[in-house]
Image (cartoon, rainbow, N blue to C red):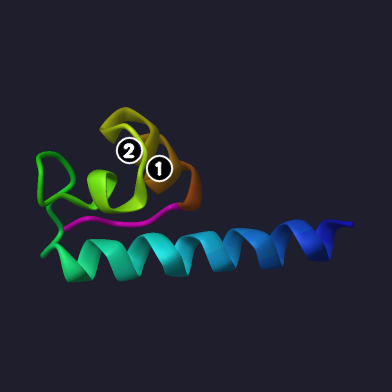
Amino acid sequence: MFAVETLSSVGIGRHILDALEATKYRIKGPRGAAKRLGVPPSTLYGKINRLGIKLS
């Protein structure tokens, strides 16, 4: 079961990175990654932190 969770995290992380790259790392606002992913900015920040994605 651990492997499934890891693969799921990788897929989610890739999806988040794709959205961040497409929005030039903007998270908030009408053209931000959160809007593109359909989640509140606070949720996206939490997922970014949990997955260890660096924004800088």
Q: Amino acid at mark 2?
A: Tyr
- Mark-to-mark CA distance, 2 and 1: 6 Å
Residue 24: assigned label = none
Q: Residue at x 66, y 61 (%)?
A: 8
* Residue on which the image places disc 2: 45
The image shows a total of numbered marks equal to 2
**Residue 53, x across and y down, in percent:** 37, 56
Q: Residue at x 74, y 56 (%)?
A: 5
The reply, left or right, for residue 52 in relation to residue 36 is right
Dominant SS of magenta comes to loop
Taking 49 as reference, is 26 above or below it? below
Which of the two residues, 10 or 52, is positioned nearer the viewer here?
10
Q: Residue at x 70, y 62 (%)?
A: 6
Q: Amino acid at mark 1?
A: Asn
Q: Residue at x 32, y 70 (%)?
A: 18
| Quadrant in which the N terminus is drawn | bottom right
Q: Which residues are magenta?
A: 52-56
